[in-house]
Image (tube, helix red, strand yellow):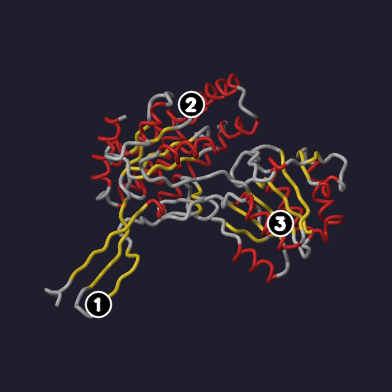
Amino acid sequence: MQDLGARAKAASAKLAVATSAQKQAALNAAADAIWARRAEIIAANEKDMAFGREKGLTDAMMDRLMLDETRIQGMVEGLSAVAGQKDPVGDVMAEWDQPTGLHIKRVRTPLGVIGVIYESRPNVTADAGALCLKAGNAVILRGGSESFHSSGAIHACLVDGLKAAGLPEDAIQRVPTRDRAAVSEMLTMTDYIDVIVPRGGKGLVGLVQREARVPVFAHLEGIVHIFIDASADPVKAMNVVINAKTRRTGICGSVECLLIDRQVADSLGADVIAALIGKGVEVRGDAAVQAMNSAVIPATEDDWGHEYLDSIVAAKVVDGIDGAIDHIHQYSSNHTDCILSETPEHVARFFAEIDSAILMHNSSTQFADGGEFGMGAEIGIATGKMHARGPVGAEQLTSFKYLVTSEGSVRA
């Protein structure tokens, strides 16, 4: 691990001065390599799927792990999108003159070396490698044991891209072991790693936050709420809720708790609950929701503030927007929350009073994704408040420095 760190540090110095054209060429070449070697990647993924079945992974986790041509095409498109984005390094964030004769610029710079620790989603290998490279950072990738073979095959394609562009191969490195000791080692490598990005469940993020001596961009669990306001449009509400829960249940933008205004509980609320159950979703509700449908399972206190990542949703009837805001304040993980409403004043209150990284109005929470925000890809969704927040793309993986010039100004 120390050797990986030393090599990444050396590579980061070269990447910091790499041209935009070089980085773009590396990413496009990596995209071409992934598509050309897709059969090899799928074969590697089959080994991981077998490993996952032996471990007894849930259906949702197996869905996260699985790669097919469509998902590989998505990785290729993500790499190409990041390649085509504006290079954030050197971007002038602000520029001004002082009465003392100083001319000051604040410009974006790479962070240096980023350590990314993630669980069973092999596509994160491509996303994280691409975004770190675009922002001029070297990266050390430590994927989950379940995606070991898939991540290795994807990583090899990223290295092909670096070679093709004449950039150091050590710019994107992968921890070549399933040994958990490697994670603990990464968390204390302050001489080599500038920031750690954990991408996974509550257990992984909690471990990182407890043990890390390196700064952390925390991506905590996605306890995502949708509030159906009394003024919600029935068609919009139905479409959004069904999509937010059932499109892909195992992603962090999947809705986990549905809050229903008491005024529409017996009408729109009951229709939405019936539709979810009809789609095979297990609904765990309070007494008012249980009264809507005999198939509703009684909710317990543990169901509020729970990330299922499965075809399960908690549901509760609340007293208007005040009740919804109070519930979210108590149970939110500050990831993504949504209001379905046609009352502008309620939307404004929701946006002002809820302090999550992403707030949505009449939109599926499945859009909580850097790619859908136009970032090409994301390395995660940061739920903290320092430096980066929300989807972390290439721009969020930079720091800045001040460039100060004058014609010989001296301080009185």
Instruction: State the image coordinates of residue 362 (x, y, percent, origin top left).
Output: 68, 60
* Location of residue 141 by image quarter: top left
Q: Residue furthest bottom?
A: 99
Residue 145, labelled with which disc? 2
Of all residues, the one furthest to the top in this rendering is: 54
Asked if the residues shown at circle 3 and circle 1 are in contact, with their CB atoms under 8 angstroms apart, the answer is no
Q: Nearer the viewer, residue 278 or 355?
A: 355
Q: What label does residue 227 carry, if any? A: 3
Q: Give left or right: position of 54 versus 274.
A: left
Q: Is residue 374 left or right of residue 294?
A: left
Position in image of residue 108 (x %, y %): 32, 58
Separation (CA) of disc 1 from disc 2:
54 Å
In the rendered structure, which amino acid carries the disc numbered 2? Ser
Q: Earlier in the sequence, mark 3 or mark 1?
A: 1
Left or right of 280, for residue 256: left
Q: Quadrant of the C terminus?
A: bottom left
Q: From where the camera sits, is residue 164 visible?
A: no
